[in-house]
Amino acid sequence: MAVSAESGEEAPGLRSKKTALLWSLLGTALPTAASAPLVWKARGAPDGAAIILVGALIIGPSLGHFYAARPGPAFAGIGIRALAGGAVAVGGLAAGSEQGATSGSNAMAAIGAIVGGASLVWDILRAPHSAQVHNDKVRRGQVGILITPSISAAGVGLLATATF
């Protein structure tokens, strides 16, 4: 729970900018640090360490946005990094083919690495902003309506819930 700027007390529903940053930073750095040495050491077929490394690099930077209840920026970053990782993989596979690496495959891998790295850094650094945007919405008391399926003694229907 975060502290309200107006009262100095904890306010329900607020998210800490520091916690959002830590989720993104540590959610990327810790699994990467733990799995990367194992991946480089193995240099073989993908194993558990490689899966953890890829997951940390693709999903880890978005964890702060998920914490801040902003799945839009989180999924956008995941998508960008997944596409960039695909470009790196295609470029790397081309290097291992019979034809070998070409300038096109090298460029694809390099662009993928640059875009993926930039997206990773961007999402980590923007996690506190996501918390701030969430907190601003909570403070303004935005109204939201949630419609969910409902099963009751009266039958099947929809239940609408308003949040203030």
Image (tube, helix red, strand yellow):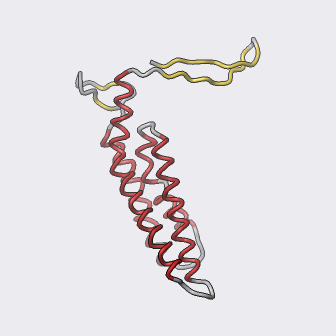
Left or right placement of residue 161 versus residue 31 in this view: right
**Residue drawn at x 55%, y 64% as measured from the top left:** 51
Work out which residue is located at the far top of the displayed protein and give it. 154
| Quadrant of the rendering where the C terminus is positioned | top left
30 and 58: which one is in front? 58
41 and 110: which one is in front? 110
Work out which residue is located at the far front of the displayed protein and give it. 104
**Residue drawn at x 36%, y 43% as measured from the top left:** 20
| Quadrant of the rendering where the N terminus is positioned | top left
- In this rendering, the answer to whether 99 lies above or below 36 is below
- In this rendering, the answer to whether 25 lies above or below 114 is above
109 and 11: which one is in front? 109
The mark total stands at 0
71 and 90: which one is in front? 90
Q: Position of residue 75 (x, y in %)?
A: 51, 47
Q: Position of residue 85 (x, y in %)?
A: 51, 65
**Residue drawn at x 60%, y 18% as measured from the top left:** 160
Q: Position of residue 8 (x, y in %)?
A: 23, 25
Left or right placement of residue 136 versus residue 161 in this view: left
Q: Position of residue 13 (x, y in %)?
A: 39, 27
- In this rendering, the answer to whether 140 lies above or below 132 is above
**Residue drawn at x 54%, y 75% as measured from the top left:** 91
